[in-house]
Image (cartoon, rainbow, N blue to C red):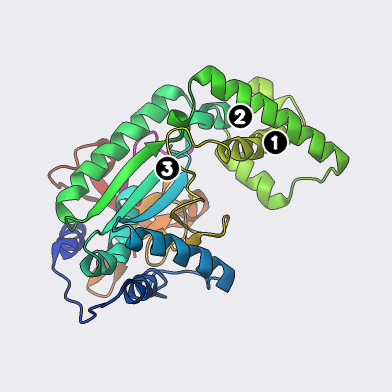
Amino acid sequence: MNAQEYIVSQLEALKAPLALDIKPKTNTEMVDAILKFLFSKKFRKFSIPEKNQTIIRTAIEKNVSNKEPIKISWPFGGYKLWRLEETPEVDWAELFSIIYFARWLKPVCALYPQGAIFTFWFDEVVISKLNNILQSELDEYQKSFRNLLKFIEPWLPSNMQFEVFLEKSQYESNEAFESGLVLEMEKLAQTRSKNPEPLSDKARRSIEMNVKVTPEQSKDPLWREKVDLMHYAYYNLQEKQTRARSSYTAENITAFTYFFEPNVIPIGSTKTSVAKFWVGIGALQKREDGFIEIILSPSQLEKANSVWEPVTIKGLESKNFKRIRVID
């Protein structure tokens, strides 16, 4: 089996019917069964505290009671890391993560007729200011991401839906966003001035990795602190927005690679990876007579001993899907 055959086989597996021997008779039994699948250790990377489980259960109960799809959000910047040669479009990392999420939700959709809606919540409204990414590059990423969702749709159960939501639609105008962000930055700066704390090494590394520093910005010794201030001021502003859609922390479940909200289910980006798909690249690692999908961070990519294999899959036409890295 070569790389292309393996990728196609994983897509085909998504279409294969899944028979379950569970037949819930009440809403409570349905909720219990759904939670069992969502909390599966096969996908979950960390244990979930009981108080978090209660919040997640409440959201599932609302969905089941209203006969609505299970609502899950995955919030992220909506861009490809500028350091990667794959930028600004999606690559195998996004596809492999979507396949992984589909595997996670497949039993839920087989059990629950209303299925699930998985929303990729783009924080693109702040990224050009925060990371100095051109708006044209954000637009290219968004377009390629939507095309990828369109590509995978035929492989999914009919009651499983992946969608994109843009945070900028929460604001009446760009001016409204800009003024709101400035206000939140001023408030947060005042709060921090009362109890100043230095940036952690982890925070500094993250900022340095993601921000495409301008020459002028680099002259400011506090540029990292200012980026961090904008980052968290944006979160504060975002929590107040419900113009276009309820907050992803209010009525749905949030899926992510680590805890940052009380309704998060911590799952990986692939079976063996927790590297985020937008700041990493997708590759295949050889396993006996097959492969396994992985996502490599920039530091992992530097150390990886890989070779390129050509790939031609109808519907995957962009430059990043013509070949794939294969690691021994």
Q: Sequence order check: which comes first, mark 2 or mark 3?
A: 3
Residue at position x 73%, y 50% from top? 200
Q: Amino acid at mark 1?
A: Leu
Other residues around mark 1 within 10 Å, as few (<14) / some (14–19) / many (≥20): some
Q: Sequence order check: which comes first, mark 1 or mark 2?
A: 2
Picture layout, residue 176 above or below residue 104: above
Which mark, residue 121? 3
Which image quadrant is residue 230 in?
top right
- Indicate left or right for 208 with 46 as reference: right
Other residues around mark 2 within 10 Å, as few (<14) / some (14–19) / many (≥20): some
Using the image as rendered, state which of residue 320 and residue 26 is in the foreground: 26
- Indicate left or right for 86 with 201 as reference: left
Q: Position of residue 19 (x, y in %)?
A: 16, 75
Q: Position of residue 290 (x, y in %)?
A: 23, 69
For the residues bearing labels 1 and 2, Cβ distance under 8 angstroms: no
Using the image as rendered, state which of residue 92 and residue 54 is in the foreground: 54
Q: Amino acid at mark 2?
A: Val
Picture layout, residue 105 above or below residue 189: below
Q: Sequence order check: which comes first, mark 1 or mark 3?
A: 3
Farthest residue, direction right: 194
Which image quadrant is residue 141 in?
top left
- Indicate left or right for 235 with 3 as reference: right
Q: Amino acid at mark 3?
A: Trp
Regarding mark 2 in the picture, which secondary structure is present there?
Answer: loop
Residue at position x 17%, y 65% from top? 13
- Residue named by callout 1: 229
- Residue named by callout 2: 213
Residue at position x 48%, y 22% from top? 172
Q: CA distance from mark 1 to mark 3?
A: 22 Å
Per the rendered image, the range of residues in magenta is: 83-93
